[in-house]
Amino acid sequence: VFAQFPAVDGYTHQSGYDSEVVRRALLKVDATVGRLRDTLRKRGELEQSLVLLVSDHGASAVHTHLDLGDWFRLRGVPTLAHPIVWQRHPRAAVMVAGNGSAMVYARPAEPRDERWPIERLRGPAAFGTRGDLVGALLQEPSVAFVAAESELGGLWIEDRKGSARVERRGEEIAYLPVTGDPLRIGGRKGGTAREWLETSWNGRYPDAVFHLLDQFRSRRTGDLLVIARDGYDFRARFEVPEHRYGHGSLIRAHMQTPVLSSQPIPQVPLRTVDLFPAMLDWLGVAAPDGIDGEPVWLPGEQRRRVRKAAREAALPGPNVRVRSSVG
């Protein structure tokens, strides 16, 4: 059973995660989970149940809005942007996510099978204007960095101070500074996806190399991904009431989320997608191939080991004589 409690998110956008209205919403969530536990306990099913309470993202205060759709329009680029999804001969489409990031599609009315690389996006033909719009975008105080595919392979990451590349090398992911260190990793590094999660856990952009590659794995992702700095977002119009707190960026306040569990959780970094194979394992169902989550935590296997040990402890040992009677 999956249950969503959207009020916490909605009220946080309006008034912050520590506001009175958010606290009241959290108390209702707490009371609901409490009633669930009481019901399971009365039925004798609590120990057989796995209850998880998890947030899909964090949040942080927003003091400045840059409407990215209007930013392109002011530079002479006919632009599609939600909720206005029709524009004659559009040269850009801007799709904002959580307000802290945005995907930009070049020439969205022209069908094509591949994304344009950063080298082409920086040319005048990309958006039909003179000059390098990607470079101009990087000078905006609201922009932390941009990401796009590269003709050299992998992803190109750039902020106003320099650039780096991220690429897969077999089972490992390599971070290769070119003229800078936009992800604040501290130099050239490599490792598996799980190692990146652990080593970047307390960094400025936790797990960013993994998530950036994962984002561009989807065919729906735009040509250019724009990530906002802490305190900024990319949507000013059509947000009623105004968003004073937001999410969607790759900063730590947005990426690290709490999870509460009725069963012991291993003390290792987890991605939220890892919870799905954990739930399947608890149910005794094999995880299908191709899902994003990894079986880092197997609560069902742990439960089965405990039950097996209890059964073996209850059995007589080889030196114990057992008397039985019939009748």
Image (cartoon, grey):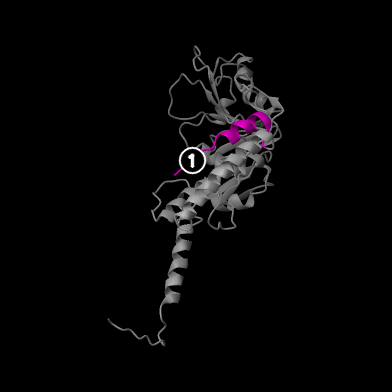
Range shown magenta: 1-17
Location of the C terminus (image quadrant): bottom left
Instruction: Please tell me how many numbered marks the rendered image carries.
Output: 1
Place of residue 183 in the rendered image (x, y in percent of width and height, measured from the top left): 66, 41
Place of residue 240 in the rendered image (x, y in percent of width and height, measured from the top left): 61, 21
Q: Residue furthest left?
A: 327
Query: Does the magenta run of residues contain 4?
Result: yes
- From the viewer's perspective, tell me whether residue 283 is left or right of residue 59: left
Residue 210 visible to an observer of this rendering: no
- From the viewer's perspective, tell me whether residue 218 is left or right of residue 26: left
Place of residue 117 in the rendered image (x, y in percent of width and height, measured from the top left): 53, 30
What residue type is disc 1 on?
Answer: Ala
Question: According to the image, label 1 marks what residue?
Answer: 3
Query: Does the magenta run of residues contain 80?
Result: no
Residues 134 and 305: in front is: 305
Q: Residue at position x 50%, y 20% from top?
A: 107
Residues 59 and 225: in front is: 59
Residues 178 and 184: in front is: 184
Residues 195 and 99: in front is: 99
- From the viewer's perspective, tell me whether residue 232 is left or right of residue 103: right
SS class, disc 1: loop
Q: Residue at position x 66%, y 37% from top?
A: 17
Q: Quadrant of residue 182?
A: top right
Q: Quadrant of residue 205?
A: top right
Place of residue 185 in the rendered image (x, y in percent of width and height, measured from the top left): 67, 46
Location of the N terminus (image quadrant): top left
Q: Residue furthest top?
A: 88
- From the viewer's perspective, tell me whether residue 226 is left or right of residue 41: right
Instruction: Note whether 314 is above or below 286 in the view shown.
Output: below
Residue 234 visible to an observer of this rendering: yes
